[in-house]
Amino acid sequence: MIHAVNRRTVILGMGALGLAATSARGQGLGPMPSLPVALNVIDVAGNLALSQKSIDAYRQKNPKLVSRITYTKAPAPELASKLKAQQSANRVDIDIVLTGTDGLFAGIEQQLWQELLPQYAGILPKPEDIYDVGPLKMQALAKGKGMEIAYSPSGPLFEYMPGRVKKTPKTADELLAYARENKNRFLYARPANSGPGRTFLMGLPYLLGDKDPADPVNGWEKTWAYLKALGENIEYYPTGTGQTMKELGDGTRDMIVSTVGWYINPRVLGIVPKEAGLFALEGFHWVSDAMFFAVPRGVAPEKMPVVIDLLKHMLTPEQQAFAYDEGYFYPGPSVKTSTLAMAPKESQDVLKEFGWPDYDRAIGSAPLEPQLQADQLVAAFRRWDEEIGAAKRK
């Protein structure tokens, strides 16, 4: 999953929007509570940057339903153990989880989530009605245990400084040749801790024409050989994407692995110079990324009608438009009818100035692939850690 670099606060001048919420009877749901409830939201994906304004708008619109909302943040690897302990003690105090695929998969594996679909299919919108092709593929990974609230086609893409890179590679072979000719000037972060690193890892089998891009154990012979050869020309692997951006910005590196969001947001923040360029290699497939709304098992029954109504509110096109933000998870909205014209003017201005001019062409010309299934992704991370990154970490 992508994690945001330090972000400046942007005041978005859009008024609160909400849904009328007087009742939410449906499969397994009782009436709305007679007294307002307090909701506890935990974010393990950096999603509050995209969703908090929408959640706050719901509270402001519905004071008879929600008394207060408490937000906390935590690393995704800590989430499963925290929830499991609360559920074992029958004292679940987390009502909503905003998570990427890593936290979602861990929760599915350990049976931590309530079913959202088809349990509340009569209340929530149908995925096939609101999601386009890419988001719909990512929603399928949730297996009904989460609802997609943010989407990016992601990458893999490559960011560079034009003054220091005279000719950009066009193919995977040319990228390897560039790294050999410019030793230690190319960089990417450890995939298990980096959205761009993870996207690069999953995207290489498509670029190299490997036997089975969905099987890192038996189908990535070319990919593992390529990563080893590339690694001979990489000084070390940072533990997070932010460090790669810093080193590109300060001149330590000339080219790094990136994604659409990571290209836009650090330039907005001044971490990377505005003039940095971005390119894709010939024959690449987008490896999509997404963030999800999930509900732990054990949430108080009287809260559930409000929780589901809040999720329904967050999936309206107008509320989804907050996700354009400063390009951090570009484009951001998972709902296909949410357009940039609906976003706050500040978001529109930022994306007009710092967006990737080639995005529309690239999104229309390359296939969209979902991420690996959970067990396969874990296997890929383990092998990369053992065979590629073990000797070159700081």
Image (cartoon, rainbow, N blue to C red):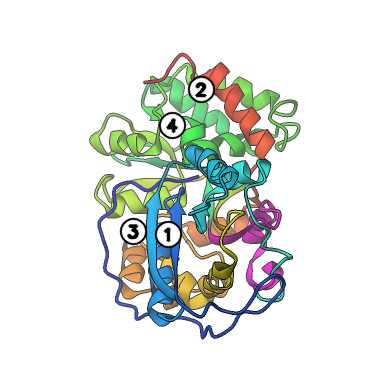
Q: Which sits in the foreground, 212 or 207?
A: 212
Instruction: Estimate the x, y position of residue 132 in percent, counting from the top left.
Output: 64, 66
Give the foreground label among 4 and 1. Answer: 4
Give, as a single range, the part of the protein colored magenta. 124-150
Residue 170 seen in this snapshot: no
Tell me, yes or no, whether the highlighted magenta stretch contains residue 130: yes
Question: If you read the primary sequence from the N terminus, does the residue marked by circle 2 or circle 3 appear first?
Answer: 2
User: Quadrant of the rendered structure where residue 57 is?
Assistant: bottom left
Residue underneath mark 3: 354
Residue drawn at x 72%, y 66% as measured from the top left: 119
Label 1 neighbourhood size at 10 Å, few (<14), some (14-19), many (20+)? few
Q: Name above or below for residue 63 compared with residue 48.
A: below
Label 2 neighbourhood size at 10 Å, few (<14), some (14-19), many (20+)? many
Element type at mark 3: helix
Element type at mark 2: helix
Label 3 neighbourhood size at 10 Å, few (<14), some (14-19), many (20+)? some
Residue underneath mark 4: 189
Residue underneath mark 2: 230
